[in-house]
Amino acid sequence: MRSMPARADTTSLVQTALLLAVASVIGYVEAVMWPPLPVPGLKLGLANIAVIIALVSLGPARAAAVSFGRVLVVALASGTVGGPVFAMSLAGAAASLAVMVALRRFGPLFSVVGWAVAGSAVHCLAQLGVSAVFVGSTAPLALAPLSLGLSLPSGLVIGCTARLLISRIPRPVLSAAGR
Amino acid sequence: MTRGDHAIVALVVALALVVVPVTIGASVRSPAEAVLTGPAGSNSVPLDVPATYAVEGRGGVVTVRVADGRAWIAHAECPDGLCVRFGAAAPGRPVVCAPNGVAVSVQAGERGALDARTR
């Protein structure tokens, strides 16, 4: 007979896998089909919706699995593993997740919209930083205003969409998975 | 949205606005030369002499065109070709091909200066 914690673990594992799959598909479609914006590495970042949902419903560890797993799967699918684009994606994902996890600790002071806006801005800055390292010049950092300006609507769209989707998830699912 | 969310939005806007004047201040000046930065180093080229430059990047050759006082990446061997679509570089707004580690930036000249250079 299965114990309750084991069942909860299985539930969260399945949900993590589902969110990783969704994030990977969205990330790949965006990487291949979405017209790139005029800043290195900058995209709308719709895959981050899955990361935010994972952070709310499954916690930081599972959200990290979804975020980094998505970066790896998209890189494998698009043939950019180990290259500069992969490094930029990884840095952006790490910075974004770190900020969102930090904001999550403040409880109700920040909603998922705030997490998404902050995560989006930090994601862009981290990518520009890595881009500057690869170029060996501070020239990419001059794109920071444009990058930050574009990250704001992007973060708002992602945050509002994530909030809408989270409100549709049945509460027993959220509580069973670990919040 | 909570108060905290509003604070984050305000912070991002403020951060962008703090950095913008630097680039706007540079852009009102007339550009004098382009700096082509690649893995092998940087090289300054005049903007008033039409030319095509080949910069050796990490993943292949990046072709930079200079004409009409502007510099842009005409061709690059990179996955998305984002740098090619970016258009011409402007003061404070470089064109970057991150996969190749190549950047084309335009250095501003003196405000109202004569259109001439000395070496």
Image (spheres, grey):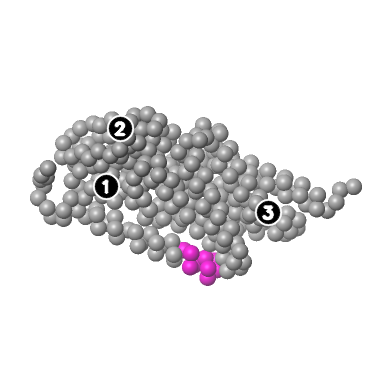
Residue B90, labelled with which disc? 1
Q: Are marks 3 and 2 in contact (CB under 8 Å)?
A: no
Residue nearest the observer in this picture, B102 or A152: B102
Say whether residue B41 is left or right of residue A125: left
Residue nearest the observer in this picture, A140 or B69: A140
- The residue beneath circle 3 is A58
Say whether residue A52 is left or right of residue B69: right
Horizontal and vertical percent for residue A158?
A: 53, 54
Magenta residues span B1-9
Residue B55, labelled with which disc? 2
Whether labels 1 and 3 belong to a single chain: the reply is: no
Horizontal and vertical percent for residue A150?
A: 42, 53
Residue B97 visible, this angle: no
Real-space Cα distance between discs 2 and 1?
19 Å
Disc 3 element: loop
Q: What amino acid type should be assigned to the residue bearing mark 3?
A: Leu
Horizontal and vertical percent for residue A86?
A: 50, 39
